[in-house]
Amino acid sequence: MAANRKLLAAAVACATVFVGVTGCSSEEKDPFEGMSADKIAKKAADASKGAGSFKVTGEGKQDGKPLHVDFSVAKSGDCKGKMDGGADGTAELLVSGDTQYMKGDEAFWKDAMSGSGQASRLKGKWVKSPNAGGEGVCDADAMFQSKELKKLKREDDSEVDGKKAAVLTKNKSGKKTTFYVAAEGKPYFLKVVSTGKDDPGTMNFSDYGTPVSVKAPAPSEVMDMEELMKP
């Protein structure tokens, strides 16, 4: 009887740890078994785009300068977020419909406008310009382009924030890109790491499917970039 109780206790413990997994084994089933690295990436791209909304944070270099970003992308394609370029200033970005709004500090505008005397005037104001569709952080189709995810190699699995992930790598022209794909639940991209001399960085993806609300700033807080650029 005591032996039966010990066996039952072990079975309950096993079921608690491996919910939904048949049997009690130290090895969990690979959800991508039999799939090539390219097919795993395609599956991840489709799932990530299909979620509609998501959050992306990251840091790296752009044109050799440090950059930190924190964005939330809505299902509609609108987005909002912040960029921190260190000595080159910080800025908020908001995209609503066909219009993009940017609000930066004086250092940001000095760098963005090559030292233009407009920098102090723009400080703290939202500056609007037409949203270039198909470009930028708000475009999930551009961010998760499956056509670019070719000739990948699968490495040993890893973890991202405690979540098991399939690891896919691509080496091209001296640049290595490593993609981490969730191996539990839906196969979303969890992290992308780029190394090499040209614009290295790390981007983390989270909050897939979480609603994101984006509201355009009040007209009184907005300046028109086209008007500002007129001679």
Image (tube, grey):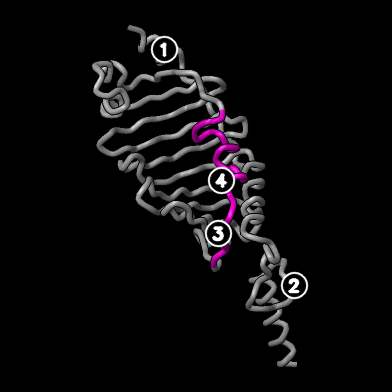
Q: Amino acid at mark 1?
A: Glu
SS class of the residue under badge 3? Answer: strand
Which disc, if any, is residue 22?
2
Q: Position of residue 25 (x, y in %)?
A: 67, 78
Marks 2 and 4 sit apart, C-alpha to C-alpha, by 29 Å
Identity of the residue furthest to the top in this view? 231
Mark 3, residue position: 168
Q: Is residue 147 magenta?
A: yes
Q: Are marks 2 and 4 in contact (CB under 8 Å)?
A: no
Report the residue at 32% width, 37% height from top.
Answer: 85
Q: Are marks 1 and 2 in contact (CB under 8 Å)?
A: no
Report the residue at 48% width, 23% height from top.
Answer: 100
- Residue closer to the observer: 16 or 44: 44
In the shown orientation, is residue 22 left or right of residue 112?
right
Marks 3 and 2 sit apart, C-alpha to C-alpha, by 27 Å
229 vs 206: above or below: above
SS class of the residue under badge 1? Answer: helix
SS class of the residue under badge 4? Answer: loop
Report the residue at 44% width, 40% height from top.
Answer: 70
In the shown orientation, is residue 37 left or right of residue 132?
right
Q: Sequence order check: which comes first, mark 2 or mark 4?
A: 2
Q: Position of residue 181 (x, y in %)?
A: 58, 56
Q: Are marks 4 and 3 in contact (CB under 8 Å)?
A: no
Identity of the residue furthest to the front in this view? 173
Marks 4 and 3 sit apart, C-alpha to C-alpha, by 22 Å
Mark 1, residue position: 226
Q: Amino acid at mark 2?
A: Thr
